[in-house]
Amino acid sequence: MKKNIWENVYYRLKDPVEIKLAILYVLYYADIPVSDVELKHCMLEGTSVDFMELCDMIGRMVEENHIKTVWRDDMEKYVLTPSGEDMINMFENKLLASVKNSLKNSVNQYYKNEQSRKSIRCDVVPVFENGFCVNLELKEGKHELLTLSLFAGDKQRALSMCRRFRENPYEFYETVCGLLTKEAE
């Protein structure tokens, strides 16, 4: 049988260990909880891996306790477990540099697009009957600038507070910083 000369032109992740390391690397590099869709998107964008193998490998990694699911932003997301962190720290050098660079670019591009959408969060949360709280969050990239929870009273006032915060969150942030750093008169 004649060997296919084009087989090695594009590097394809076939080895289960390489696929596991690539998954761990995405979670390690992202450094935040990653949803199933985000993980698969970054892996498929950054590498050439079979989708069914990828899905199977993610399930195995949860079973093997290298990754676990947590509940964030109203959905399940994956994070590294201590054994997963140990594994990627020990074997990161086993991944090809081109694969790591491709995964980094994929994660960076995905979160660059997502960050603008997720940089401002404002939730109205009921605390008791006819009593509502407003949870405000302002991020710059992966870093939190402001996280604040305020009792608003009724629902209308809470919705009004959220609307005002969304109109100009940076003005709100500067005002709060100004109040907290104001010299004593």
Image: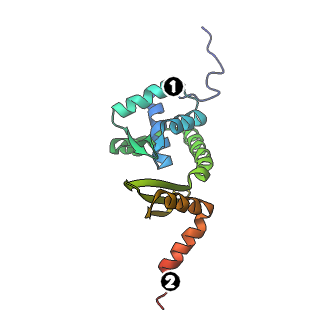
**Pick the front one: 75 or 83:** 75
Q: Nearer the viewer, mark 2 or mark 1?
A: 2
* Name of the residue lying farthest toward the top: 1
In the picture of the structure, the residue carrying the numbered disc 1 is 14
Horizontal arrangement in the rendering, residue 80 relative to residue 2 (left or right)? left
**Pick the front one: 67 or 9:** 67
Q: Residue at x 47, y 54 (%)?
A: 124
Please name the amino acid that badge 1 sits on: Lys
Horizontal arrangement in the rendering, residue 128 relative to residue 182 (left or right)? left
Please name the amino acid that badge 2 sits on: Lys
Q: Residue at x 48, y 40 (%)?
A: 35
Residue 15 seen from this side: no
- C-alpha gap between disc 2 and disc 1: 60 Å
In the picture of the structure, the residue carrying the numbered disc 2 is 182
**Pick the front one: 13 or 27:** 27
Rendered image quadrant of residue 152: bottom left
> Element under label 1?
loop
In this rendering, the answer to whether 149 lies above or below 21 is below
Q: Residue at x 63, y 47 (%)?
A: 113
- Graded by Cα atoms within 10 Å as few (under 14), some (14 to 19) or many (20 or more), the crowding at tag 2 reads few
